[in-house]
Image (cartoon, grey):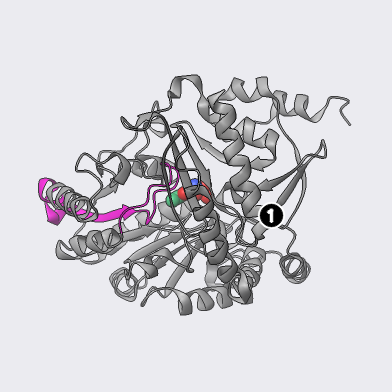
Amino acid sequence: MSMNSLPELDRDHLIHPVTSFRGHEAAGVRVLRSANGARITDTEGHELVDGFAGLWCVNTGYGQESIVEAATEQLRRLPYATGYFGLGSEPAIRLAASLAERTPGDLDHIYFTLGGSDAVDSALRFIRYFQQARGMPGKDQVISIEKGYHGSSTVGAGLTGLPAFHEGFGVPLDWQHKIPSPYPYRNPVGEDPQAIIDASTRALSDKIAELGAERVAAFFVEPIQGSGGVIVPPKGWLKAMAETCRAHDVLFVADEVITAFGRTGPLFASADEDVIPDLMTVAKGLTSGYVPMGAVFMREHVYATIADGAGSHTVGHGHTYSAHPVSAAVGLEVLRLYEDGLLENGRRMGTRLLDGLQGLAAHPLVGEVRGKGMLAAIELVTDKAARTPLPAAAEPGQRLFDRAWEEGVLLRAFPSGVLGFAPPLCCTEAEIDRIVEITARVLDRTLE
Ligand code: PMP
């Protein structure tokens, strides 16, 4: 047993999933010890409200005994089953069937992964197989959106529209293309919803025409851009994008890794927008962060084309932990909890959160308050009229995070000066109010 403290051991050995190596080492790790409901406690005994559900994933909240029981029971009975060799396990089969019943339209065929990045990778694989099975192997170009985030694998980072994830990595790959973000607060066409929808439709059509529709396989989109700063497109935008894809024989892929499972209100954000994507990726809320799991859903026509085109030969794609039985058992219980009141509570608390944050709109640092359901953001500016972003050079992200932490709330502070909110759906009114009050204090301290 080492005599070194946890922060020292962390500094010397554990690489964190962030961009600033030495920055973390200098500040020292904050070690979380336990959590319950929407509350997290660190090893110093400091208790906070988790305003970001971990990393927008612990949608049910922590300490849900029935999830612990489901996982424990499955660990005892059958901790592992491969999906290779035509094998399977009961929880995986039941979870696939339960999800298929709830997805929009005929998004009925499901491949399970470990998280979001490999769900995106898998979707790309299936898209290639689909076009090849149709006899169109040259239809292999993919379009996504600036400020989108689709994971940290080579493929996912290339689809991502945030330059920090590209630098020094040889991505985007030559078949990955971008169109501008709909970003209402900073769109050159202004904030009029129809103007934004028209501009994005034109940008997508033009990009497809430029590449040649016979070469464009798919378009990837988040219903709300999460890691880009919680960018909420106008109502009807997602449907317009889906229709543009359909008109050009391009597969429409909704990346719902953040937006699914109650985060924006319903189980799936696409359903709210009256869209049935050809493929859909999820992770995070699928198992509420208790164990890792992601998934790709595909519509009947996509599945049938791949299956028929491939005939009896195997497609070269798979993961050791695909459809992991413990994750699946957790997923089934998590789904039950969502439908047993959590989605409903999340919708009520989401309204309270957004109303509360709107109450801060007059603050001199607040440029815009936006969100949907239990997903919200405040974009901070130094000049409200000119919409001047907080200067990123001074690392306002980390400072804002630290201040919120000291006051008692875990918030996401994006380097662009956007504060992100994604609390667990189980939050109480008092917890939502505490998030809003502390945000107000953090803003006041930032002015000092
Ligand atoms: N897609 C989206 C929309 C995401 O937000 C994320 C993660 N934040 C991913 C994909 C990647 O998921 P993971 O981190 O589980 O690999």
Magenta span has 212?
yes
Q: Looking at the picture, how far across and down is residue 290, in whole percent?
A: 67, 57
- Left or right of 218, for residue 330: right
Q: Residue at x 56, y 71 (%)?
A: 344
Q: Looking at the picture, how far across and down is residue 222, in whole percent?
A: 37, 54
Q: Residue at x 65, y 62 (%)?
A: 426
| Disc 1 residue: CB within 8 Å of ligand 1 | no
Q: Residue at x 17, y 49 (%)?
A: 199
- In the image, 28 versus 373, the foreground residue is 373
Please say if 269 is above or below 103. Answer: above
At label 1, counting other C-alpha atoms closer than 10 Å, the crowd grade (few under 14, some 14-19, many 20 or more) is: many
- Left or right of 172, for residue 135: left
- Left or right of 275, for residue 213: left
Q: Residue 422: tell me if it is visible.
A: yes
Q: Which residue is mark 1?
A: 38
Quarter residue 1 falls in: top right
Magenta residue span: 208-234
- Left or right of 61, for residue 150: left
**Residue flagged by tag 1: what amino acid is it?**
Ala
